[in-house]
């Protein structure tokens, strides 16, 4: 049987212990679910709505904002309305927030995308996926329908919540001064983001940002990777990007040639918050700092020449701008998206070694579960208020 793990919470505690009687008439936050989808994803969308309604929103009635780069058809709209009594708004995403900006040479960008397809990079050859990632990186929070909201909860097709959520996560995040909440942190596919970290760390350096303690979550631990006294000439120590590239005006959208020996001193460990679930403050995304970050990343062309996901973009921005106490780990939410799930009973073991604001000690340090077991162990563990069943 799996060992029981003890969570030592440093800057971030589970908000609520055990099941409550949901406060159906309690205070509400200024918040909405945000669902980006296409008409053909209706079945998956209904699955997700059924799940979130059953486990949370039947008590709390938060509104939904549906977004699409096309038009939702009447079947889609009518079907969705059959599964919730909460308010629903339908939004169209304009070309200013979706697709190639005018400073990009479309032909070059499309060739770059085709190459990623040839290289069998996951979703690399799919142009719409690149647009989606860029939209969720730098534009969703600018959509007119979201302007009135302070908070959002991202919902994707084909997800599942296993546990009743009997408290209001927005209200608790507000109360605790949190900015960004996640349930799952995983490793990115390297080939989708070969240069993302060069730009993210250059942003940090150029703005003289020193780590507030979260950045370390995203770098390979030096003691794991290299001896402490490694000389600076070692090729593993890599030079920063030249300033003139970083400061260049929006141009071709082509990444500069990479000198294989030129990289920042730190190395990205590929860890990121899995952004298909997210509860976050919109004003953080709307901040000058976040947008400066996005614009610099965007100008590099990495959304086309590579297949940067919005998850590592959000995560590295958080690493550069936020501190561990701004982040909330929803360790008590049972959540599944396609093949990866978080079960309150077991997933902490999978994630915690990389997360600086949580320390985990296991009763038997040597006992290491196989990855599948981390994600699939069904026994709930009644500990620290984390104890619902993953069903
Ligand atoms: P995955 O979770 O990374 O496998 O990617 P998904 O296919 O689930 O896409 C992520 C989110 O973006 C989902 O909410 C999709 O419905 C949405 N999405 C992806 N591509 C498009 C697109 O071209 N148009 C629209 N409207 N939504 C999209
Ligand atoms: Mn998805």
Image: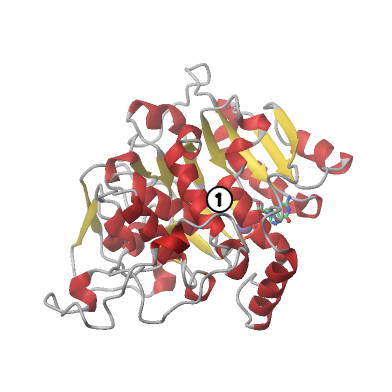
Query: Which residue is found at the position 31% from the left and 65% from the top?
Result: 219
Ligand 1 found in image quarter: bottom right
Q: In the rendered image, which quarter is residue 268 located in?
A: bottom left
Asked if the residue at label 1 sits under 8 Å from ligand 1, the reply is: no
Tell me where residue 41 appears, x and y as whole percent. 75, 53
Q: Is residue 65 above or below residue 109?
A: above
Query: Which residue is found at the position 63% from the left and 65% from the top?
Result: 304
Mark 1 secondary-structure assignment: helix
336 displayed left or right of 21: right
Query: Which residue is found at the position 28% from the left and 83% from the top?
Result: 235
Tell me where residue 99 appears, x and y as whole percent. 72, 54
Q: Nearer the viewer, residue 376 or 109?
A: 109
Q: Nearer the viewer, residue 102 or 266?
A: 102
Tell me where residue 114 appears, x and y as whole percent. 71, 76
Q: How is the image coloured?
A: secondary structure
Q: In the rendered image, which quarter is residue 384 located in?
A: top left
Q: In the rendered image, which quarter is residue 21 located in?
A: top left
Q: Is residue 365 above or below residue 324?
A: below
User: Can residue 185 be seen from the camera position used here?
Assistant: no
User: Can residue 309 be seen from the camera position used here?
Assistant: yes
- Find the residue positioned furthest to the right: 74
Q: Nearer the viewer, residue 263 or 354?
A: 263
Q: Quadrant of the N terminus?
A: bottom left
Tell me where residue 348 appears, x and y as whole percent. 33, 57
The residue at which mark 1 appears reads as 137
263 displayed left or right of 298: left
Query: Which residue is found at the position 57% from the left and 47% from the top?
Result: 138
**Mark 1, other Cα within 10 Å: few <14 / some 14–19 / many ≥20:** many
């Amino acid at each position: 049987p799996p060992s029981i793990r003890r969570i030592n919470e440093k800057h971030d505690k589970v908000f609520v212990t055990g099941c409550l009687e949901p406060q159906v008439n309690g205070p509400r936050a200024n918040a909405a679910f945000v669902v980006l989808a296409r008409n053909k994803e209706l079945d998956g969308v209904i699955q997700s709505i059924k799940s979130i309604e059953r486990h949370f929103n039947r008590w709390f009635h938060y509104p939904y904002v549906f977004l699409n780069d096309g038009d939702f058809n009447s079947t889609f709209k009518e079907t969705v309305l059959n599964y919730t009594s909460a308010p629903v708004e339908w939004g169209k995403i304009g070309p200013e927030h979706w697709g190639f900006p005018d400073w990009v040479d479309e032909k070059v960008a499309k060739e770059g995308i085709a190459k990623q397809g040839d290289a069998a990079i996951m979703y690399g050859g799919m142009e719409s996926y690149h647009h989606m990632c860029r939209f969720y990186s730098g534009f969703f929070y600018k959509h007119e329908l979201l302007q009135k909201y302070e908070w959002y909860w991202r919902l994707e097709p084909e997800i599942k919540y296993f546990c009743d959520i009997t408290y209001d996560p927005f209200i608790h995040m507000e109360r605790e001064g949190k900015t960004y909440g996640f349930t799952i942190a995983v490793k990115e596919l390297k080939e989708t983001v070969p240069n993302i970290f060069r730009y993210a760390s250059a942003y940090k350096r150029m703005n003289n940002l020193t780590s507030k303690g979260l950045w370390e979550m995203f770098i390979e631990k030096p003691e794991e990777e290299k001896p402490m006294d490694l000389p600076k000439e070692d090729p593993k120590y890599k030079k920063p990007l030249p300033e003139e590239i970083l400061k260049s005006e929006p141009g071709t959208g082509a990444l500069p040639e990479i000198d294989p020996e030129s990289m920042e001193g730190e190395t990205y460990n590929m860890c990121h918050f899995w952004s298909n679930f997210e509860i976050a403050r919109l004003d953080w995304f709307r901040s000058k700092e976040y947008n400066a970050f996005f614009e610099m990343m965007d100008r590099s062309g990495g959304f086309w020449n590579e297949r940067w996901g919005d998850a590592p973009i959000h995560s590295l921005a958080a690493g550069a701008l936020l501190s561990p106490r701004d982040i909330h780990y929803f360790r008590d939410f049972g959540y599944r998206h396609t093949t990866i799930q978080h079960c309150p009973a077991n997933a902490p073991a999978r994630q915690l070694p990389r997360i600086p604001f949580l320390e985990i000690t296991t009763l038997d340090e040597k006992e290491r579960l196989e990855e599948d077991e981390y994600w699939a162990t069904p026994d709930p563990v009644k500990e620290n208020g984390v104890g619902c069943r993953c069903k």
